[in-house]
Amino acid sequence: AVEDRKAKELKLLENTLHVELGSEKQERREVEQLMMKQIEEKLNSLHADVHADLRRRDLESSQRTSELSRNLDALSHRIDQTRSISEERLSKLSDVLKEEVTRLTSILSLEKQMRETTEVTMFKMLEDMCTKLQKEIDVERKERERSEASILKLLEDTCAKAESGR
């Protein structure tokens, strides 16, 4: 009877262990499933976050690229405008300088022509004055020679009268 009792207790203990072990296995599976579900949810959440972050970065990158492209186009346009304005101003300045050089060349040419004309006129006047003075000198010389000849004749006549009257 003791052995039957011990066998029954052992059998009861065995059944209890078996039930508890089954219960433990069931709990462990449930915990594992719960953990797997949480891990899967966390992975899905992280995957969604990474995917959203990648989309956001792609969008930001695309927007930055677009903005940089627009800025580059605007800068290129401004450079072209500045270059065009510079070329136009340079052309106008070149035209003004050419006109000024032409004007100054014309003035210099006119002044040279006037100087040459004045020189010719002055030389002609000097020649005329020299010729006039030479003629006056010649006239004066002839008059002096005539006066000297007259005075000499008077002296000779006076000397001749003075000698004949002695």
Image: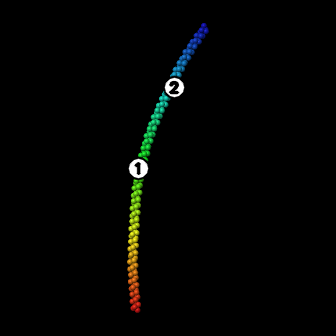
Q: Is residue 127 left or right of residue 10?
A: left
Residue extending farthest right? 3
Could you tell me which residue is drawn at 57 percent across and 15 percent down?
17
| In front of the other: 6 or 70 | 70
Kindly indicate the quadrant of the structure image that contains residue 99: bottom left
Circle 1 sits in a helix, a strand or a loop, which is it?
Answer: helix
Could you tell me which residue is drawn at 39 percent across and 89 percent down?
161
Which quadrant holds the N terminus? top right
Could you tell me which residue is drawn at 44 percent across and 36 percent down?
63
Q: Which residue is mark 2?
A: 39
Whether residues under marks 1 and 2 lie with C-beta atoms below 8 angstroms apart, the answer is no
Task: Tell me the crowding category of disc 1: few under 14, some 14 to 19, or many 20 or more residues within 10 angstroms, Cα based.
Answer: few
> Distance from label 1 to label 2 (Cα)?
71 Å
Q: Which residue is mark 1?
A: 88
Q: Earlier in the sequence, mark 1 or mark 2?
A: 2
Residue extending farthest bottom? 166
| In the depicted structure, whether residue 118 falls above or below residue 148 | above
Residue type at mark 2? Ile
Q: Position of residue 31 (x, y in %)?
A: 52, 21
Residue type at mark 1? Glu
| In front of the other: 100 or 33 | 100
Which quadrant holds the C terminus? bottom left
